[in-house]
Image (tube, grey):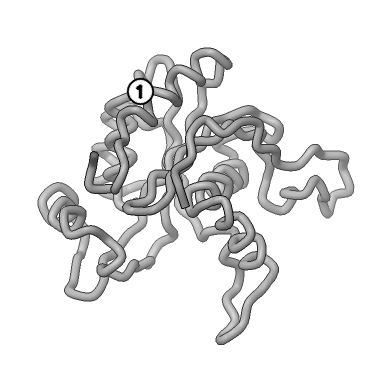
Amino acid sequence: MSDRGYPVQPILGEVMRRATSLGVRKIIVVSSAGRTAKECAQYFNPNEFDIIVVTDRAHSWWPIDQIPESYRDTFRQEWPFEVTESDYACGIAPDSAVAQELYKLGVKRIVQGTEVFRGILWSSGLNLNLVVAETLKLFGDGVKVAIECALMACDAGAVEPGETIISIALPPMKSHAALVIQATPSDELFGVTWQRRAHPGLRVREIISKGWY
């Protein structure tokens, strides 16, 4: 058992076997500070798979009390991230030292941006984006994050609309997910586009692995 609260290697093994069986090359990996990205980059052969990392936007901070103590130690020891008593800086800038190490390990691309299900926040209120987020969280945090980051990767052009990919979310101490997804841009999530083009929208083709919620 890892300090995430669940074993990681079996999940990655399932993903590799299914990706090979389906002929899927692009694997989306969600990573706030680089640890998950590093694990996946070391596990998957870069000659066989394209690892695309999706990370937090610039100037993003997370409360430190949401992160296991062992993670905080890892950040201080392995990555040049600012960690305070109350929070830590996250988001892997494409030109950062962390990114350069990931590129050397074979990561194909790093996509940095705002979570599309966050939307423009209202003080003491909500918006449609948050309704979608909370609905997906009924299936677990990992499902929400894996779908969200697949949309972000498509928005950035890292994957093509309609392309079949696998998206992996391994949040610490929360429900994980590994999903086979038909990609789409975020504004075409439901198959409706302002350009009025026919589009199939996002599809979750298969759940390779999902943790308890």
| Rendered location of residue 183, percent (x, y) | 65, 37
Left or right of 183? Residue 145 is left
The correct choice, above or below, for 127 with respect to 89 in the image is: below
Q: Quadrant of the N terminus?
A: top left
Query: Which residue bears the numbered disc 1?
Result: 44
| Rendered location of residue 143, percent (x, y) | 53, 47
Q: Residue at x 20, y 54 (%)?
A: 71
Left or right of 192? Residue 143 is left
Q: Residue at x 17, y 59 (%)?
A: 69
The correct choice, above or below, for 205 with respect to 119 in the image is: above
Of residues 204 and 75, the one nearer the viewer is 204
Of residues 62 and 69, the one nearer the viewer is 69
Q: Residue at x 33, y 39 (%)?
A: 37
Q: Secondary structure at mark 1?
A: loop
| Rendered location of residue 19, percent (x, y) | 50, 20
Q: Amino acid at mark 1?
A: Phe
Crowd class of label 1 (few under 14; some 14 to 19; many from 20; radius 10 Å): many
Left or right of 38? Residue 76 is left
